[in-house]
Image: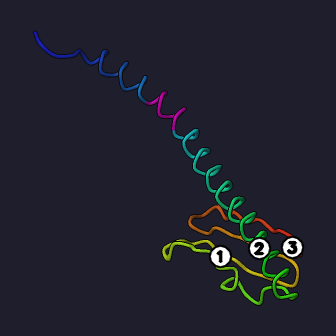
Amino acid sequence: MNGFTLVEAIVVSVILLILSAIAIPLYNGYIKQSKRDRVHDLAITASAAANAYFRKTGSPPPDASSLNLFLDNNSKIGIEIDSNEIIISDTSDAEWVSETLYAW
């Protein structure tokens, strides 16, 4: 007789389920951490650009477009400037990641 027995198929299925139960949460954690890192890196860049704008003009940047940050048009990253803080947020999925920096 060729093929697998039912017990062998069940054992293999259980092993695959256990491995996926471990791997999927780890993968989701890596994705969330990469989003946090991307927002943090962009926040540092935006803060440096805002400080350079302030040193050059003597006034805070009026909006995010004056920082000359090149973002992908499909990106769901938002940049807001309010008095002396820069708020970077990524709303690309259900978990909202944001970071606030104080500049100049």
98 left or right, relative to 71: right
In the picture, the quarter occupied by the N terminus is top left
- Mark 1 surroundings within 10 Å by alpha-carbon count, few (fewer than 14), some (14 through 19), many (20 or more): some
Check disc 3 and report the residue beneath it: 103
Marks 3/2: CA–CA distance: 11 Å
Is the residue under label 2 in contact with that under label 3 (CB below 8 Å)? no
Residue 44 percent location from the top left of the image = 75, 63
Query: For residue 40, what is the image quadrant?
Result: bottom right
Q: Residues within 10 Å of mark 2 (few under 14, many from 20)?
A: some
Is label 1 in a helix, a strand or a loop? strand
Q: Magenta stretch?
A: 17-23
In the rendered image, residue 7, in percent from the top left (x then y), is placed at: 31, 15
Mark 1–mark 2 CB contact (< 8 Å): yes
Using the image, determine if residue 86 lies above or below residue 98.
below
The image position of residue 55, as x and y in percent, is 85, 80
User: 70 or 37: nearer the eye?
Assistant: 70
Q: Secondary structure at mark 3?
A: loop
Q: Residue at x 54, y 42 (%)?
A: 27
Picture disc at residue 39: none
Q: Amino acid at mark 2?
A: Ile
Q: Nearer the viewer, mark 3 or mark 1?
A: 3
Instruction: Identify the mark at residue 78; answer none if there is no mark.
Output: 1
Q: Amino acid at mark 1?
A: Gly
Ranked by sequence position, the earlier of labels 3 and 2 is 2
Element type at marker 2?
strand
Q: Is 53 one of the magenta-colored residues?
A: no
Per the image, the residue denoted by label 2 is: 87
Which circle, 3 or 2, is nearer the viewer?
3
Label 3 Cα crowd, 10 Å radius (few <14 / some 14-19 / many 20+): some
